Amino acid sequence: MLPPASEPPGRDTAAPAAHAPEEAPRGAGRPTVEAARPAARIGRNSAGSSRDAAGSGRDVFFDNAKYLAIVLVAMGHSWEPLTGQSRTAGALYMTVYAFHMPAFIIISGYFSRGFDLRADRLKRLITGVVVPYVVFETAYTLFARWANHDPDMPVSLLDPWYLTWFLAALFVWRLTTPLWRIVRRPVPLALAVAVLASVSPEVGDDLDMQRLLQFLPFFVLGLNLRPEHFALVRRRAARIAAVPVFAVALALAYWAVPRMTSAWFYHRESAQELGAPWWAGAVMTLAMFGCSLVLTGCFLAWVPARRTWFTVLGAGTLYGYLLHGFLTKDARAHGWFDGHGWPHSPLGEVAVSLTAAAAVTTLCTPPVRRGRRPGADDRATPAPHPQVTTARRTRPAARHPSLRTPGRPPGRTERE
């Protein structure tokens, strides 16, 4: 390891170039990024995360985090039909739902720090978010017509079905990024917006607005995070503390399963719609924001910062996220859970979990990704793809890093 090159006073030396494009210092020369080291090995930056020095320029820590998170998403969806008969499955389901989407959204916000309203970035937002949203919203609706025997189900781009709500929300969140950069206290303001949404049943269903507003604080938090914040959860003390914290979370979830609905973790309805008094929305929004942050930190603490066999799959989580929903819904439509008893046994629950993990892993593999249209921007999706620019060498012993210039509960409708 070589010490980082010296920086002019006031320069953020902890921000690696592979994370997001940002403004270069005024008066700087030709924009550069940290050059790849000669050997194909992983170099650790000053923030504690690792960057692939083999030529891809991707941060393997975030690729690992995205893959592990998408596996938890798929497993959580597979556990949903089991929660009615298994308290253990319900506890796992509730614990995972407390942090898996917040983790995705925080990472998406972190990689959106350099977004502005430049024409090229708006174009990438349209090709990377709007086009997949239109394609998959239409595909999911056609699939639902067949699976639910509802040929009259309309195709509505204003009413996201199942997984596509995230793309609709991400489009709006990224458009508002310049606004959050000029707000003095963005995270408290976003929390206030989420609280107001949670106590307002009048908020419409267009673009799944409740989820868009109630998950907003996580995106805004990601916009304001820096590499050194992620370094804090990579410390050995954080990894050790994560074990008892997760154990306590599972115990609390096991206790809460018969006492509360997991719909609180979906953030798609107001407190009144969940049969609770209005003030419960404010209390639960703030409490779950704190719990989600703690569990997200514990999850990130155990994400490997080195290249692993699944690192390459982190670049394809968009495909795993959008495609695994067809498998999940098809299994429910064919009664795989309701018509058989074995999935509800302990061994059956393990088999279901492993099957879901294997399926989403397959959907993240390079052969699946090769079918994408050139120019799609993975950074705007659950699989943000760092942008790497041409590098130059500033001195033989060290490289000078800089940045380039810039599910509804039963009883609701089927449109999740």
Image: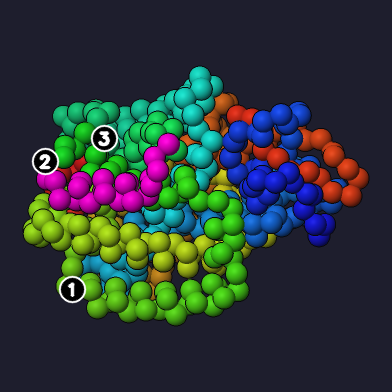
| Residue for badge 3 | 207
Figure check: 238 above or below 102: below
* Residue 236: image location, x then y, percent: 60, 74
The boundaries of the magenta stretch are 182-201
**Chain-order first, disc 3 or disc 1:** 3
Q: Which mark is residue 258?
A: 1
Residue, x 48% and y 74% (percent of image)? 242
Q: Which mark is residue 202?
A: 2
* Residue 291: image location, x then y, percent: 35, 65
Front label number (2 vs 3): 2
Q: Answer yes or no: do the residues labelled 2 and 3 have beta carbons within 8 Å?
A: no
Q: Indicate the quadrant where residue 231 lies.
A: bottom right
* Residue 404: image location, x then y, percent: 66, 33
401 with respect to 381 (left or right): right
**Chain-order first, disc 1 or disc 2:** 2
Q: Is residue 193 magenta?
A: yes
Mark 3: give few (<14), some (14-19) or many (20+) Cα within 10 Å. many
Front label number (1 vs 2): 2
Q: Is residue 182 visible?
A: yes
Label 1: element kind: loop
Q: Amino acid at mark 3?
A: Leu
